[in-house]
Image (spheres, rainbow, N blue to C red):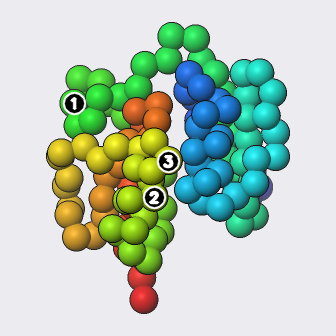
Amino acid sequence: MTASLMMVNIDCDDPQGLAAFYSELLGWKITYNEGDYAMITGEGTSIGFGRIEGYAPPRWPDEGAPKRFHLDLYVDDFDQAEARGVELGATKPDFQPGEGNWRVMLDPSGQPFCLCRRPS
């Protein structure tokens, strides 16, 4: 049996807010938005956002509160993508491993994601 990825679901405290953030950042459509769950769809897959009571984001780069996952996003221009992310509510933490190849950002819920240089 071979499995295939249907979608990714992200635990958070504000499903509608994160769906709006990633929808704008990725240019994907919000395809579901009700109560404790929201979903965006684009490029052949979906990302869902589900409310978890007591959600606490990881503290980047504190290993005492390890991240659970992160999204890597290809971009053509680091500065432009970073500025757009900040405009939408992301922040750029001071600690940046691998500067030059990727940039770590924190989404509005505090979850890390990376802007990665698109290969030429």
Is the residue under label 3 in contact with that under label 1 (CB below 8 Å)? no
Residue on which the image places disc 2: 84
Q: Residue at x 46, y 36 (%)?
A: 108
Q: Where residue 10 sits: x, y (%)? A: 59, 35
- Toward the bottom, the furthest residue is 120
Residue 72 drawn above or below residue 89: below
Residue 37 drawn above or below residue 90: above
Is the residue under label 2 in contact with that under label 3 (CB below 8 Å)? yes
Residue on which the image places disc 1: 62
Residue on which the image places disc 3: 88
Look at label 2 and name its amino acid.
Arg
Q: Where residue 57 sits: x, y (%)? A: 41, 26
Q: Residue at x 82, y 46 (%)?
A: 31
Q: Residue at x 65, y 61 (%)?
A: 27
State whether residue 86 appears in this view: yes
Q: Where residue 74 sits: x, y (%)? A: 47, 69
Look at label 1 and name its amino acid.
Asp
Q: Residue 107: which quarter of the image?
A: top left
Sequence-wise, the earlier of marks 1 and 3 is 1
